[in-house]
Image (spheres, rainbow, N blue to C red):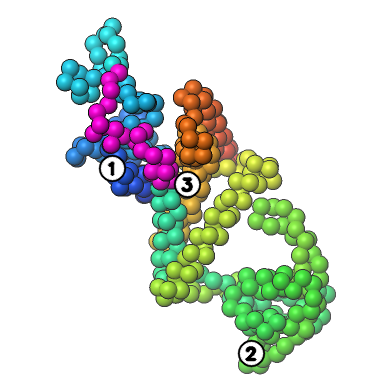
């Protein structure tokens, strides 16, 4: 079942991504020749109208093939084989020329991706990553309406000889406010104390039926952030009881909270890439298809909400990664189109081909590293 869940996750996210390209291409009147889930050899396919819809052998990606895209059509000429009546034909007989250039008709130029202005091409290429981010946004909104688990501000441990213990805070006290600001979640406790920057804080708590207040001076401490970096901060010496409740929100609240969560996940994803490049986050933390399959199975068993949350997180990662300015990714194409928009001339074919080769080698190297990490992590038992 783990593989089935992984195929579902990847299939949905790839479809969302490619549908973004497809839809915006249609809006700009570009002829879409193929829409494929997966890449490599065709498993099944059907042509509807001018587009062939495919399911291909390798489910780790997909593509939308547009008329005039890439190196097949440049400068108004088609390098596809042409028959006597001017229509594209199959491969030539052995020993004959495999490509016969011909001038495009005016109608073909109107439907050609290469003949669209740079802004139109930018919109078509950017649509894939944007649709992934929109999918995550909608998923987070739905999750808020379904119910979000939250840790209550109940204290489970008071550390000996720390500021809270000295002030009189006890286990099972519930924090209700800090410096007059209402507290409803445990994470708000740490945020309020950090915001005080070492100055005294007034902590309101509920103990049984009594409401009490304590003035506490936080003490400096060194801790680790999400990326394992040492950071300085302040603490009062309490730990959460780990009490979890499920919160439900109305449609408007869900939109606000879903938007905030989407922004937060995008920020963390971008920072993770920066820390990875800085080697703060080690390369052996990278995961590949095996990790995705394992996490898909685990979240599916945990319930529909967990599975949807995992899809949303993965969709953000897919959207952000595809915007990186690496040739063969959407971000690489966007770089070329922005260059053309600014300098009023396209990047030369030779430069693009060289960049594509470098980008492909880089991408294959990262994929190989991710596969290696997966094998070490799950089969060798190291890492």
Q: Position of residue 145 (x, y in %)?
A: 41, 71
Q: How many marks?
A: 3
Provide residue 161's location: percent of width, then percent of height.
83, 75
Q: Secondary structure at mark 1?
A: loop
Instruction: Pick whichever of labels 2 and 1 is earlier in the sequence.
Output: 1
Q: In the picture provided, is 58 more to the left or to the right than 33?
A: right
What residue is at 44 percent from the left and 70 percent from the top? Answer: 254
Mark 3 or mark 2, whichever is nearer to me: 3
Mark sitting earlier along the chain (3/2): 2
Asked if one can make out residue 13 in the rendered structure from this viewpoint, the answer is no
Chief secondary structure of the magenta portion: helix
In 3D space, how far apart are the residues under numbered discs 2 and 1 (Cα atoms)? 68 Å
Give the number of the disc on residue 29: 1
**Circle on res. 208:** 2
Q: In the rendering, at what x and y percent does residue 203 appear?
A: 71, 82
Residue 368 is a magenta residue: no
Magenta span:
101-126
Q: Which residue is depicted at the point 72% across and 57% down?
A: 224
Q: Relative to residue 83, is residue 303 drawn left or right?
A: right
Residue placed under numbered mark 3 in the picture: 318
Measure how far apart labels 3 and 2 are at the Cα level: 48 Å
- Seen from the viewer's position, the closer of residues 57 and 46 is 46
Q: Does the CB distance between marks 3 and 1 fall below 8 Å?
A: no
Q: Residue furthest front?
A: 344
Mark 2: which secondary structure? loop
């Amino acid at each position: 079942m783990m593989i089935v869940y992984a195929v579902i996750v990847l299939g949905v996210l790839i479809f969302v991504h490619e549908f973004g390209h497809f839809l915006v291409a249609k809006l700009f009147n570009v002829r879409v020749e193929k829409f494929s889930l997966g890449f490599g050899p065709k498993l099944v396919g059907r042509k509807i109208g001018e587009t062939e819809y495919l399911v291909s052998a390798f489910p780790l990606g997909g593509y939308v093939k547009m008329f005039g895209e890439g190196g097949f059509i440049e400068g108004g000429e088609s390098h596809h084989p042409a028959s006597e009546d001017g229509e594209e034909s199959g491969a030539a007989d052995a020993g004959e020329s495999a490509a016969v250039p011909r001038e495009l008709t005016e109608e073909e130029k109107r439907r050609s991706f290469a003949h669209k202005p740079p802004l139109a091409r930018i919109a078509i290429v950017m649509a894939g990553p944007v649709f992934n981010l929109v999918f995550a946004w909608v998923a987070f909104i739905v999750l808020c309406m379904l119910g979000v688990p939250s840790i209550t501000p109940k204290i489970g441990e008071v550390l000996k000889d720390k500021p809270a213990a000295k002030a009189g805070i006890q286990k099972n006290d519930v924090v209700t406010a800090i410096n007059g600001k209402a507290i409803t979640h445990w994470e708000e406790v740490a945020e309020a104390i950090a915001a005080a920057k070492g100055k005294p804080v007034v902590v309101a708590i509920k103990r049984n039926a009594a409401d009490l207040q304590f003035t506490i001076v936080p003490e400096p401490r060194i801790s680790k952030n999400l990326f394992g970096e040492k950071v300085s901060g302040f603490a009062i010496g309490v730990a959460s009881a780990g009490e979890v409740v499920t919160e439900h929100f109305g449609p408007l609240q869900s939109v606000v909270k879903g938007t905030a969560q989407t922004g937060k996940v995008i920020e963390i994803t971008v920072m993770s890439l920066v820390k990875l490049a800085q080697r703060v986050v080690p390369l052996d933390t990278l995961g590949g298809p095996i990790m995705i399959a394992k996490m898909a199975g685990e979240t599916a068993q945990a319930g529909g909400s967990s599975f949807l949350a995992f899809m949303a997180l993965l969709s953000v990662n897919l959207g952000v990664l595809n915007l990186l300015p690496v040739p063969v990714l959407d971000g690489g194409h966007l770089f070329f189109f922005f260059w053309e928009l600014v300098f009023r001339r396209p990047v030369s074919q030779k430069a693009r081909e060289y960049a594509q080769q470098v980008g492909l080698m880089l991408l294959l190297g990262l994929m190989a590293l991710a596969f290696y990490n997966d094998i070490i992590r799950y089969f060798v038992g190291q890492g």
